[in-house]
Image: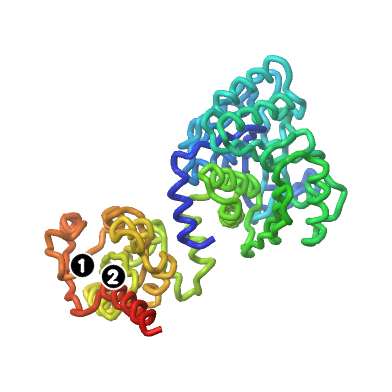
Amino acid sequence: MDLSALQHLLALAPGRRVACVGDLMVDRFVYGDVSRVSAEAPVPVLARSRELVMLGASGNVARNVAALGGEVSLVGLVGGDAEGHEALRLVGAEAGVEGYLVTDSGRPTTLKTRFVAGGQQMLRVDLEAARAVTGDVEQRLVRTIRAAAKGAGAILLSDYGKGVVTDAVIAVCREAAAQSGGRLVVDSKARSFARYGAVDMIKPNAAELGNATDLPTDTDAQIETALARALELWEAKAILVTRASKGISLAIRGEPVRHFPTTPREVFDASGAGDTTLAALGLALAAGASIEDAIAFAQLASGVAVGKAGTATVSPDELVEAALSAHMAPAEAKVATTQRMLDEVARWRAKNLKVGFTNGCFDILHKGHVAYLAQARAWCDRLIVGLNSDESVRLLKGEGRPVNDLESRALVLAGLRSVDLVVPFGEETPVKLIEAAQPDVLVKGSDYAESEVVGGDLVKSWGGEVKLAPIVEGYSTTAAISKMSAGKVSGKASA
């Protein structure tokens, strides 16, 4: 997914509502070191060092939707036990997650405890009751789903086989999706997917597709055969198959199967990667993205998630960083997110280096830009360039601008020796970046008065200075565009 498309999608995500329904779990990770075997039995002894507790299954889907900027309502079931109280606490602590939890005092809250040493999972202990909910509990779930799914652009149904996803729950999810105009996407561990009916999409992994169709699913050709069979067996409008390092395959009824390869990534922990994929896919669809962009968004998010420990969430900044690194050579890694800028600035200050900052659109890089940036760099030890996003340039310069997209402009700037870091921003001014970086020197062109420089008063307030770099006469992006347009007109006339 290119940077411009990613930033456009991330800009659309805030305020988009997603309902996450299904089996809710508490995931506990116990970390430690193993250096000996027990004298009581031939088993390793884990010297516990720390413990992490977080929401899993549908709870992890909701966490990821919220982390990516969406508004999410979470419908799930907990028991009247300590783990249920823990789940309620975790939901309440998650920013952006609105909890709609139903309590069933007759069953335990699903708990998965994993013991990890040396980066490897040694043992998992499950506490659960996998029987279907019935009676009053089921009716309370149905009523809760109706309330929680109002206005949702996507309903994500996570069926881990723990009993929450009954026929009545599936029916009300279909009904709610139809009423809100949202997409209903099912992620299930079931042996058969027929009972979900005409949902918008079912998202099995390759192994689950193979189990459900009794067909091999190793190669593209085998996947295509299995998907054709699945569309005969199920009423779903589309089936999306996640295939780990082999990418994603998509079958839409009446269309050829399409395959979406993925960029290979180092896998640290695959726990919850499917939840991240579902969350990103659902949020993108709720934001009105095409299926192609939604899949690319989901692949990018899951690729980041598998590089983390536990059932981790993924932030927009991490997605931008991943998108940049996927398209850049090592020398071009100077293009950074705000968070990475802060990390770099901290390292520079630890070395007593003077930090400079300037900003602009830098649409068509010309001699004047190069001279300006060289002068800015001469006034500091490290220079940060704040770069307007495509939408920000369009607001400032009008339709038809920028001529070059954000990724192209960032890469060209990153290739200059005078530039140490390029940080894109979407606001009209770079004041937030300036506040975050707290540069020692703020540089702007001499066509500005010092009093007109955005952020100048801020920089002076912490003891910094504002510098005005001379402008090279006869060079500007506007002039370059006019010259190119005149050339096109002249070319047409001579033709």
Per the image, the residue denoted by label 1 is 444
Q: What residue type is disc 2 on?
A: Leu
Give the residue furthest to the right: 214
Q: Position of residue 39 (x, y in %)?
A: 77, 47
Location of the N terminus by quadrant is: bottom right
Q: Quadrant of residue 87?
A: top right
Q: What residue type is disc 1 on?
A: Lys
- Which residue lies at the image location 20% right of the left edge and 67% below the top edge? 444
Q: Where residue 353 is drawn, which disc sits there?
A: 2
Q: Residues within 10 Å of mark 1 (few under 14, many from 20)?
A: many
Q: Position of residue 210 (x, y in %)?
A: 82, 50
Q: Residues within 10 Å of mark 2 (few under 14, many from 20)?
A: some
Circle 2 or circle 1, nearest the eye? 1
Q: Position of residue 282 (x, y in %)?
A: 58, 43
**Structural distance between the alpha carbons of marks 2 and 1:** 20 Å
Question: Tag count in the figure?
Answer: 2
- Which residue lies at the image location 80% right of the left edge and 46% below the top edge? 230
In the image, 226 versus 70, the foreground residue is 226
The correct choice, above or below, for 212 with respect to 23 in the image is below
Q: Position of residue 14 (x, y in %)?
A: 44, 42
**Label 2 vs 1, first from the N-terminus:** 2
Location of the C terminus by quadrant is: bottom left
